[in-house]
Amino acid sequence: MVSIIRPAERDTGTAQTPGMRREAGISGTLTGSEELWMGVGRNEPGGTSGVHHHGESESGIFVVEGRLRFRWGDALE
């Protein structure tokens, strides 16, 4: 199956954390995906995102502009 999700169709009702605005493009709601979530996340310059998890979903990050410090695990390594 192929799904084309245009920017205006992204789901802004997806889970949010302080400091980051997310729009889902691939999710269970939009495409029926069971193990993959992909979308667009935006932070203000110098901003941070609250601690959060992606459940059982696989995760990846692609930085379009700026720099990113990514921490993970129970100790936020």
Image: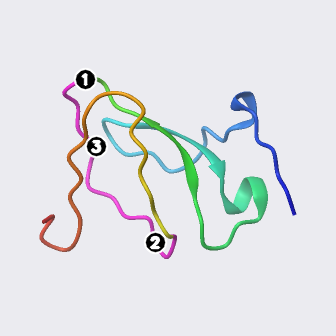
User: Label 2: how many residues lie within 10 Å, few (<14), some (14-19) or many (20+)?
Assistant: few
Mark 2–mark 3 Cα distance, whole angstroms, equals: 16 Å
Circle 3 Cα neighbour tier, 10 Å, few/some/many (<14 / 14–19 / ≥20): some
Give the magenta part as a residue range.
45-57
Q: Disc 2 or disc 1, which is closer to the eye?
A: 1
N-term mark: 2 or 3? 3
Residue corresponding to mark 1: 45
Provide the residue designation for mark 3: 49
Q: How many labels were placed on the picture?
A: 3
The residue positioned 44% from the left and 45% from the top of the image is 16
Which amino acid, by three-letter code, is at mark 2? Gly
The residue at 25%/41% (across/down) is: 68
Instruction: Give residue 33's position: percent from left, percent from top.
Output: 70, 66
Does 66 sit left or right of 14 as displayed? left
Q: What element does badge 3 sit on?
A: loop
Label 3 sits on what residue type? Ser
